[in-house]
Amino acid sequence: MDLILQLAATGLVVGSLYALCALGWGIIYGTTLHFHVAHGAVFTLAAYYAYVGQKLLGLPLAAAVIVAIAAAAASGLLIDRFLYQPLERRGAVRTTLFIASLGLLILVENTLAILFTPDPLRMDIGVLQTSIRLGPVFLTYLHVATVALAVIGYGALVLFLKLTRWGQAIRAVSSSPAMARTIGIDLGRVHLLTYAIGSAISAPAGILVAMDVGVEPYRGTTFVLLASVGVIMGGIGSIGGALLGGLSLGLIENLGVWKIASEWQSALSFGVFLVFILVRPRGLFGRKVQSAEL
């Protein structure tokens, strides 16, 4: 029983990372309908921003993290401003945007590997690496902070969308871009804001992974794929669904280790996903997605 509880606790931590990434990816996709695989590049860049801030610029860890989140938000905004929006103005179909996004992800990953080498780079996290015991479960302060940040990120996003003027504009565009345009909402500005917010929400996940197991250039690809899986399982357009989908994936991966080899974790996640969408194609809480030209 202790082993199962430990695996569940580890799954909750990993699921919180997936959930943060899914929250950011989900709000971007739900608002823009861009299958934004370059979100993995932003995830990875956030980790390198924090590493550079602490190790090369000498910033305190907290300051490096704040700067990294801001830089990640700016990176997401710039991707929309200088890649997606110009392509859309030229009539590019969504498949073209997807390939462009994939190309950017590959470009960023390989550039980082050249600049920093593919080897893991370690950050100094001090007391955060200290282990604590919660009943039969052992976690580090970093793991506890990871779960807390997932909850905080979810709550902050929900409050922003419900209580602010820009949040209501994002919801309007997500529900019906055509109707939003007729009432005077600038879709381009809303998309830019959405990319900044989605990137800022997911950036802590990249930074937390870097703190835990090191900074690596190719990790973002796995996370963005699992984030998209979490969003689809939870239901496109549902913030709570993205959170639940991400947490579920983490639990599935880690509880599966109880019976199968760890090498099969990702295969297990995608296997469960395929079965799930055959039963519920729209996910747990999903809405009908706007039709889009391929």
Image: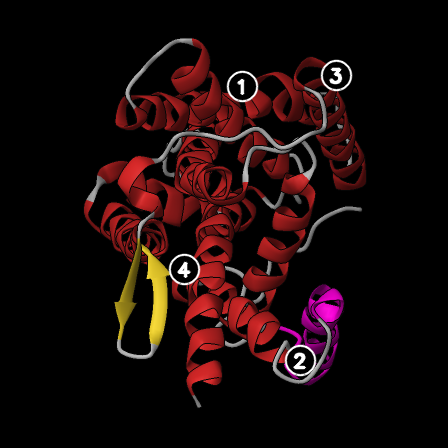
Label 3: how many Cα within 10 Å (few below 14, some 14–19, many 20+) = few
Q: CA distance from mark 4 to mark 2?
A: 19 Å
Label 3 or label 4, whichever comes before in sequence order: 3
The image shows residue 65 at horizontal and vertical percentages of 35, 28
Helix, strand or loop for disc 1: helix
In the rendered structure, find residue 49 and report the number of the disc placed on it: none
The residue depicted at 52 percent of the width and 73 percent of the height is 251
Quarter of the image for the N terminus: give it.
bottom left
- In the structure shown, which secondary structural element does the residue marked by tag 3 occupy? helix
Above or below — where is 36 with respect to 103?
below
User: Picture coordinates of residue 198 (x, y %)?
Assistant: 45, 40
Q: Name the residue tied to disc 3.
A: 114
Residue, far top: 57
Q: Which mark is drawn over residue 276?
A: 2
Q: Separation of disc 2 and disc 3 at Cα?
A: 39 Å
The disc labelled 1 sits on which kind of residue? Leu
C-alpha distance separating marks 1 and 2: 35 Å
Magenta-tinted stretch: 262-282
Q: Secondary structure at mark 4?
A: helix
Q: Position of residue 279 (x, y in %)?
A: 68, 85
Kindly identify which residue carries mark 4. 239
Assess disc 2: are there few (<14), some (14-19) or many (≥20) residues with their C-alpha within 10 Å of its C-alpha.
Answer: some
The label shown at residue 78 is 1
Give the mark count: 4
Query: Residue 260 appears in which quarter of the rendering?
Result: bottom right
Residue 36 left/right relative to 134: right
